[in-house]
Image (cartoon, rainbow, N blue to C red):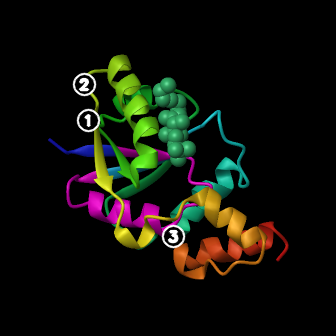
Amino acid sequence: MERIAIYPGSFDPVTNGHMDIIKRGLALFDKIIVTILENPAKQTLFTVSERVDLLQESLKEADRIEIASYGGLLVDYAVQRNATAILRGMRAVSDFEYEFQMALMNRKLNREVQTVFLMTGLRWIFTSSSIIKEAVKFGGDIKTMVPPVVHAALKKKLNL
Ligand code: PNS
């Protein structure tokens, strides 16, 4: 049986931290569906279609990856795609409570779908899409923290 995982997130935009989780996740799963879902707590800088394009471009050389977007519940999409796992990256302790709550809610909604966490690589422990957007907005150099296509898209979007 093919082991399929959904790697869900806002990806606004995709960062090298996400890329690291995806590449390491491929050692555990036959296929990873990187899926943009709605996080009602977040206002996004990029549209869904822009985020899909950025993921597609950043991951064009990766095998066994699919990029998708979905407008409903994560566990419903996992069932729809025959995925048995949800892959998430965990950074510092500060992520724990949010991830714990989300994993337990998803488990309550569907006990067949397991959440699997990978610890973020040390290099990326301090990065997030939000803090990268803030830094770049005020002129910070974030080139090493995102794929080149994302760097260019951020500069264009923010008229820098
Ligand atoms: O990158 P993020 O913003 O931390 O990702 C959060 C996301 C998009 C994975 C989460 O908000 C989500 O799963 N949204 C879809 C709706 C859903 O199923 N929520 C979880 C159970 S309430």
Whole-angstrom CA distance, mark 1 to mark 3, is 25 Å
Whole-angstrom CA distance, mark 1 to mark 2, is 7 Å
Q: Is residue 40 magenta?
A: no
Q: Which mark is residue 54?
A: none
Which residue is label 1 attached to?
Answer: 84
Q: Contact (CB < 8 A) between labels 1 and 2?
A: yes
Residue visible at 55% across and 59% down? 128
Query: In the displayed structure, does residue 155 sit left or right of residue 151?
Result: right
Q: For the C terminus, which image quadrant?
A: bottom right
Residue visible at 56% across and 53% down? 11
Location of residue 158 in the rendering, given as x and y in whole percent from the top left corner: 81, 68
Instruction: Please tell me which of labels 1 and 3 falls first in the chain.
Output: 3
Q: Contact (CB < 8 A) between labels 3 and 2?
A: no
Residue visible at 37% across and 58% down? 65
Q: Which mark is residue 112?
A: 2
Name the element at disc 3: helix
Which residue is label 3 attached to?
Answer: 58
Q: Please, what is the three-letter code of the amino acid marked with disc 1?
A: Thr
Can you tell me whether the CB of the residue at mark 2 lies under 8 Å from the nearest atom of ligand 1? no
Can you tell me whether the CB of the residue at mark 1 lies under 8 Å from the nearest atom of ligand 1? no
Location of residue 93 in the rendering, given as x and y in whole percent from the top left corner: 39, 49
Q: Please, what is the three-letter code of the amino acid marked with disc 2?
A: Glu
Location of residue 35 in the rendering, given as x and y in whole percent from the top left corner: 48, 46
Query: In the displayed structure, does residue 68 sit left or right of residue 61?
Result: right
